[in-house]
Image (cartoon, grey):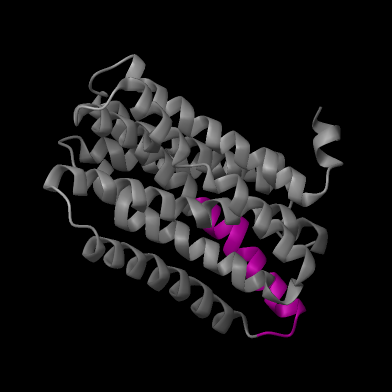
Amino acid sequence: MINFFYGLNPAMQALIACTFTFLVTAFGSSSVFLFKKFNKTLLDAFLSISAGVMIAASFFSLINPAIDMAEKLNLIPIIVLIVGILGSTIFLYLGDKLFEKKIKISKDKKRISLLIFSIILHNIPEGMAIGVAFGSVIYGLDGATIGAAISLAIGIGIQNFPEGSAISLPILGSGSSKWKAFIIGSLSAIVEPIAGVIGAILVLKVNIILPYLLAFAAGAMLYVVVEEIIPESQNTEKKDLMAFITIIGFTIMMILDVALG
C-alpha cells in the first residue's frame, strides 16, 4: 500500500493526503452526535499539540526546503522568505478584517460566521502547503521528502479535529440541528483537497515559484498558530500543561520527519 502511494504522481498524493485531513475535520464535526458541549481541556490539548506540530512543520517541511530551492534557482533566500511569509500573513490578516466589516448579522451568528470563515480561509493555505510539500519532492530538496509531506499532512490532520468541533458545536448551540452542524463543520475543510491539488500542480508546472509557495504556506501556518491556535489553547487555567503539550507536538513532528523522511 505504501509503495503504491509512493508511485503516484504528486497531485494525486496531495489529493489523497488532503482528503485525509478533510475526513479528520468531519470526524471532529461528528462530536455533535456525542456531546452537547465538548470538553474544554481536551479541546485545548488537541489545539496545543497541533500548534507544536504546525510550528515544526513550518520549519522542517516548508522553510528549509524553500531556502534550499531558492539557492538552487539563484534567488536570494532571505528575500524569498520575507516575501512569502509576510505576504501570507498580510493576506490572512486582511481577509479576516474584510470579512468582519462586510457581515451585518446578530452578534452570535456573526461570531459563528467569523469562525467558519476564519477556518475556511486558513484551510486553503494548509491544503496548498500539503500540495507544495508533495510537489517539491521531485526537485530533491533537503527536507523535501514524501515522508516529510506525509508527516505534514498528519500534523494538519491533528489540528483539523478540534477545528471541526470548534465549528459544529457552536452551530449546534445556536439552535441548528445536529446534522446541519455536522455538515457545515465538515464542509469547512472541503477546500483543502482542492488547494492541495492546485499547490502540487503549480509546483510541477512553474518551479520558479516553488520557494515562494513554500514560504507562503509556512507563513500562513505560523499566522494560524500565533493568531488563533495558541491563544485559544492558552485560554485556560492549565496554561503550563498546554505549553508542555505544545512542545510534545513539536517533538512528535520532528520524530515523524526523521522516521518518515
**Residue in the image at 27% along x and 41% along y:** 233
Quarter of the image where one finds residue 175? top left
Quarter of the image where one finds residue 174? top left
Quarter of the image where one finds residue 214? bottom right
Q: Position of residue 153 (x, y in %)?
A: 59, 43
What segment is highlighted magenta in the picture? Answer: 56-75
Q: Is residue 247 above or below residue 81?
A: above
Could you say which is closer to the camera, residue 207 or residue 189? 189
Q: Position of residue 45 (x, y in %)?
A: 33, 33
Could you say which is closer to the camera, residue 224 or residue 235? 224
Q: Is residue 27 above or below residue 203?
A: above
**Residue in the image at 33% along x and 47% along y:** 229
**Residue in the image at 53% along x and 42% along y:** 190
Q: Is residue 125 above or below residue 251?
A: below
**Residue lying furthest front:** 104
Q: Position of residue 161 (x, y in %)?
A: 43, 32
Query: In the rendered view, does 209 fall on the left or right side of 7?
Result: left
**Residue lying furthest left:** 107
Magenta stretch, main secondary structure, is: helix
Q: Is residue 6 above or below residue 198?
A: above
Q: Please tell me whether residue 140 belongs to the stretch shown in magenta.
A: no
Q: Position of residue 224 (x, y in %)?
A: 38, 55
**Residue in the image at 38% along x and 48% along y:** 119
Quadrant showing the N terminus: top right
Residue 34 in view here: yes
Residue 130 in view here: no
**How many numbered marks does the figure carry?**
0
Query: In the rendered view, does 70 fall on the left or right side of 225?
Result: right
